[in-house]
Amino acid sequence: IIMSKILKELTKIRSDTFFTVLTPEKMPGFRYDNTEQIEYKQPSYPNKMRQDFQTEQLDKIVDYKRKDWDFVYCYLPEHAERLENYFNNLTNCRPVIFGYSAYIEIPATAKYEANLLYSHYAGLIKMNSCGVNSQAVKDTIMEHAPSCLPKDDVKKLESILQPLPRGWDNVEGERKKPQTDPKVIVWNHRPNTYKGYGWFLKQIDELWEQRKDFKVWVPLSNTVEREYIYNKKFDRQGYFTELSKCWVGVCGQSLHTGWANSASDGMAVGVPYIFYDADYYEQYAKDAGIYFKKLGKENTWKSIIPQYNEHFILAEKKLKMVKETTDGYKKILNYIHKKEQVTKEQLLDYLGWGRGIPFNIYRNRL
C-alpha cells in the first residue's frame, strides 16, 4: 500500500522510470501509466516467504531475450543474493539491485527454531543500497553483522544501509470526532511480544481497575483477551474512519527498534500517540507531529520522495556501458541503422548472442 504511494510521488520527479511490480494479486493502488502489475505467487507466512524463490516464474517474467532490466528493487534481502546469481548466470541482463529491509530475524524478534539471518546478511551485501526503517534499525543490523559476515563485509554494509522512512498511507473517506462514551484507545500494531503488547496489556489492566470508561481497539488481533478489547475488522477506508474516532494510540518498546507505520496511520487522521521513550520513535514522531500542523499531507511526501530518488541515483551510477569504439557496439549500431527498428530478440538472433554475453552494457551505450 505504502509502496504504491511512493511510486506515485516518485514519478512526479522522474518520468524516465517504468515500474514492473510483482504482486500476488492485482492491486488498485498500482494502476499508473508507468506501472504494470504481474501476478507472482509467493507464500504469505514470513519465514516461508523469505526462503521461497520462484525461478520458473521469473523465467517467464524476465524474458531476457525480449526485455531488459536496469534495476531490481528488492523488498526481501534474503532474495537479493539469489537474484544476482539468477540474472548473472541465467540471463544477459545485469540490473543494479537495491531495496529495503523491513524486518530482520534477530533472536529478540524471531522465536523460530531456525532462521534465515545469514541469508538476510548475504543479500544485504549484494545490494547497492538498502533502506531501513530508522537509524536505530541500522544500528541493530550492524550490531549483529559480525556474527554473520567477515570484517570487510561488515565495513561495506555500513555504507549500504540507509535510514529511510517508509512513508504512510491515508485513504480518503469519512472522519469522526474522537469518541467519548466510551473513549477508545487504539493498539493498531501487531499484538506481538516484540512490539511490547504484553507490557501494554499490563498497563491497561491497571487502568481498568481505576476506571472503566474506555475500550481498546486491537484490529490485528484474532482474539479478544480482555473485556475492554474489541477487534472489529474493516476494509482500508473503514479502518481509517474507525481510527479517526480513537482518543489516543500507544506504541510500546519495539525489539525490532523500528518506527511504527501504524502510528503514522493514526497521526494522519489526527490521533495523538504515546510513545515509548526511544530514538527510533523520536527520530520521526517529534518531527511528524510538527510536520502535520505546519505543512499538511501533500508536503509530507515531498520530504520523503527525494530520499527514495537518491537510491535510484546511486543505482544509476552503477550502470555500466561499453565504449563507442567497441566492435560489437558498432556492429549493433550499423544493424539498427540499416533496419531502422528492431526488437531485442531480432538483434540477439542477428548477433548470435546468448545469455553468456551481458547485453545491458551495449543497451546502456545505445
Image (cartoon, rainbow, N blue to C red):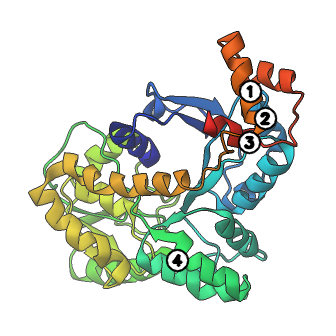
The answer to which of 34 and 252 lies nearer the viewer is: 34
Q: At which x and y percent is residue 200?
A: 38, 78
Q: Position of residue 334 (x, y in %)?
A: 72, 21
The residue closer to the viewer here, 287 or 26, is 287
Relative to 331, say whether 183 is above or below.
Answer: below
Distance from label 4 to label 3 (Cα)? 40 Å
Which image quarter is the N terminus in?
top left
Residue depicted at x 66% and y 59%: 46
**What element does badge 2 sit on?**
helix
Specify the amino acid type for callout 4: Tyr
Q: Nearer the viewer, mark 2 or mark 3?
A: 2
The image's mark for residue 332 is 1
Q: Nearer the viewer, residue 157 or 42?
A: 157
Local packing at callout 2 (Cα closer than 10 Å; few below 14, some 14-19, many 20+) is few
Q: Earlier in the sequence, mark 4 or mark 3?
A: 3
Using the numbered discs, state the Cα–Cα distance from disc 1 to disc 3 in whole angstroms: 17 Å
Residue topped by disc 2? 328
